[in-house]
Image (tube, rainbow, N blue to C red):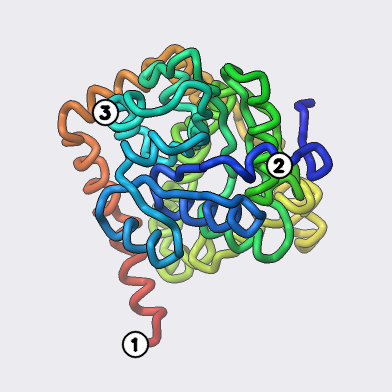
């Protein structure tokens, strides 16, 4: 079992008097900045381009600077940028200006794991990464409860990087639920596996079930409603998180419970395991990172083709019609 940090393990004093720069004032950046300010962090600044996020930061009462200026002023920098743009921004607007002894707090392990960003040895390299969308980070904080967060210390240049990381986790409000100590590779591999293996398998099951139901003559509206439009799977997933993958079963009828447990034992998992292993190996050995890098250099042409194919697929076309029919308009 991994180390988990709670409120008693963190001390906001390690961070409350530091100048904290949020680089990227999107959903996560805004929520994290507001949470830390409400927790008593005194000086939070925003590093951004002059776009809508710049205006939003000003409206929220934060001083806003160019990314380069914010990097020069900050003691702690939150790198809340998309993986694909972060290396270029780091090289151009952060690395030349950040002070020795400063702390870089990454929201994703991707660029550290694969070496696209190589910070100076005189910097603390940490990660305090909520496992929650930005809206949830703010709403749950306002409710007075915590949310799970990954905490990493990858490079400790000043001797107190761990205290800074856990202090930040507490300031964000996550230590009420527990901040889980992992590595950058843990975060990268697990996150990419969800995106490249677990969810594609789930989407494939739904897509194939839909096609089977239609072939068997069931109404399209009924098929999609039963599969996911009713949001029943969302409620089941929430109960799995609250109670356990199998321990939520008593919430269902006994017919349902028996059907789920008995057929779970009948699924041939050999292909699933093989698919999972193949994707994990491509993530671990860097093959996917190289593939994605090549795709970006190709102006995302294949990515756009894949999106178009998915958005025009049989199930996508059907759900658009069903949602319109069920809207009552």
Residue 287: image location, x then y, percent = 37, 16
Residue shown at 49%/30% (left/top)? 104
Mark 3 nearby-residue class (10 Å; few <14, some 14–19, many ≥20): few
Quadrant of res 85? top left
Distance from disc 1 to disc 3, alpha carbons, whole Å, reads: 51 Å
Which one is nearer the viewer's eye here, 209 or 196? 196
Residue beneath disc 3: 92
- Check the image and report above or below for 47 versus 266: below
Residue 242 in sight here: yes
Q: Which mark is residue 329?
A: 1
Q: Quadrant of the C terminus?
A: bottom left
Point out the image quarter for the N terminus: top right
Dot 1 and dot 3 residues touching (CB under 8 Å): no
Instruction: Tell whether 149 sits left or right of 286.
Output: right
Q: Is residue 225 left or right of residue 94?
A: right
Name the foreground residue: 52 vs 147.
52
Instruction: Tell me, for residue 13, which label it has, or none.
Output: 2
Q: How many angstroms separate mark 2 from mark 3 (CA)? A: 32 Å
Q: Nearer the viewer, residue 288 or 150?
A: 150
- Looking at the image, do the residues carrying marks 2 and 3 touch, with CB atoms under 8 Å apart? no
Mark linked to residue 269: none
Q: Position of residue 122 (x, y in %)?
A: 50, 16
| Tag 3 secondary structure | helix
- For the residues carrying marks 1 and 2, which lies nearer the camera in this image? 2
- Residue 260 appears at what percent x and percent y? 70, 49
Task: Decide which of tag 1 and tag 2 comes sooner along the chain.
Answer: 2
């Amino acid at each position: 079992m991994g180390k988990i940090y709670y409120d008693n393990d963190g001390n906001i004093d390690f961070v409350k008097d530091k100048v904290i720069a949020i680089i990227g004032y999107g959903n996560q950046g805004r929520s994290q900045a507001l949470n830390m300010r409400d927790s008593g962090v005194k000086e939070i600044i925003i590093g951004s381009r002059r776009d809508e996020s710049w205006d939003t930061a000003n409206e929220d009462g934060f001083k806003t600077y160019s990314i380069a200026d914010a990097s020069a002023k900050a003691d702690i920098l939150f790198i809340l940028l998309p993986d694909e743009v972060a290396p270029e921004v780091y090289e151009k607007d952060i690395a030349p200006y950040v002070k020795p002894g400063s702390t870089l707090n990454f929201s994703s392990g991707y660029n550290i794991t694969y070496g696209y960003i190589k910070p100076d040895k005189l910097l603390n390299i940490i990660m305090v990464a909520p496992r929650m969308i930005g809206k949830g980070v703010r709403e749950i904080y306002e409710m007075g409860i915590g949310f799970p967060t990954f905490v990493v210390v990858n490079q400790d240049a000043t001797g107190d990087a761990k205290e800074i990381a856990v202090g930040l986790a507490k300031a964000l409000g996550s230590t009420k639920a527990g901040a889980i100590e992992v590595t950058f590779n843990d975060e990268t591999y697990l996150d990419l596996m969800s995106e490249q293996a677990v969810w594609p398998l789930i989407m494939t099951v739904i897509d194939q079930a839909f096609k089977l139901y239609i072939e068997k003559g069931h109404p399209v509206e009924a098929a999609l409603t039963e599969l996911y439009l009713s949001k029943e799977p969302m409620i089941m997933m929430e109960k799995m998180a609250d109670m356990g993958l199998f321990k939520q079963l008593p919430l269902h009828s006994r017919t349902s419970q028996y059907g789920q447990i008995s057929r779970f034992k009948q699924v041939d998992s050999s292909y699933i395991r093989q698919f999972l292993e193949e994707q994990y190996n491509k993530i671990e050995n860097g093959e996917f990172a190289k593939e994605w890098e090549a795709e970006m250099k190709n102006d995302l042409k294949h990515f756009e083709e894949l999106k178009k194919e998915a958005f025009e697929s049989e199930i996508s076309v059907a759900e658009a019609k069903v949602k319109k029919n069920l809207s009552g308009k």
